[in-house]
Image (spheres, rainbow, N blue to C red):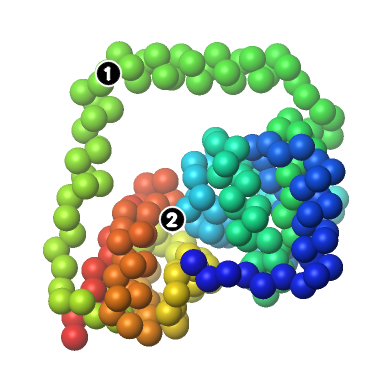
Amino acid sequence: MKGIGLSTSQNILCADSIMDIRPNHTIYINNINDKVKKEELKRSLYALLSQFGQIVSIVALKTMRMRGQAFVVFKELAAATNALRQLQGFPFYNKPMRIQYAKNDSEVIAKMKGTFGDKEKKKEKKKKAQELAANAAKKPAAAAVPVPMLTVQVPDNPPNHILFLNNLPEETNEMMLSMLFNQFPGFKEVRLVPGKHDISFVEFESDMQAGVAKDALQGFRITATCAMKITYAKK
């Protein structure tokens, strides 16, 4: 992945934030371009951040008080920490992201409702999650059905410095794909195909660099329902 250079002041800010607030599963992001529509913002954040680990929730409100801000809740603490460190200062819609841990995991709910904590609702959510897990355990055959689809080899062409992407969701845009592939060495550009929402091309400086990105992002889900398929483009 490409390193993201930070100024001395940004490093100091980042260090102070991490020291002041206890690490937890929720990261708070601000300095976001407030002209981006809420749904596009959430999709772009998911595309950028889900590489670090499973995302439980993304909260981005367009109220005056919450414009330019978002909360992202990860399932694992390590994922939240890696995202914070790797993307601090990342140019997101032409503005550097400022990231810190949320004051506590319940701050997401607090920002949505204007008050901290609702223990009863937390218990209810936990109970529902346990029930869903129990139901899933009772149906192992059904749960196992989609798994082989993820491991199927995608028919490929000879190595090429240009990748061909398909099975992209309709809302995919150049910014989302650029943020996703820009983290791999040698990335040059994304080329969308006019009138074709589900395909795109991504160019790298060499065949080898394209291959690294291809292997890393094969099957990546930009949305929950669309697993991206990547092959080398035909020469």
Check the picture and name the quadrant holding the C terminus: bottom left
Horizontal and vertical percent position of residue 172: 45, 64
Horizontal and vertical percent position of residue 194: 38, 80
Horizontal and vertical percent position of residue 21: 80, 41
The answer to whether residue 193 of the structure is visible from this angle is no
Specify the amino acid type for callout 1.
Answer: Lys
Mark before the other along the chain sequence, 1 or 2: 1
207 and 70: which is toward the camera? 207
Relative placement, left or right, of 35 versus 211 is: right
Find residue 101 and report its image quarter. Answer: top right
Circle number at residue 152:
none
Horizontal and vertical percent position of residue 85: 65, 55
Numbered marks: total: 2
Q: Residue at x 75, y 41 (%)?
A: 102
The residue labelled by disc 1 is 139
Q: Is residue 46 above or below residue 88?
A: above
The residue labelled by disc 2 is 222
Q: Are marks 1 and 2 in contact (CB under 8 Å)?
A: no
Q: Residue at x 84, y 30 (%)?
A: 115
> Callout 2: helix, strand or loop?
strand
71 and 226: which is toward the camera? 71
200 and 83: which is toward the camera? 83
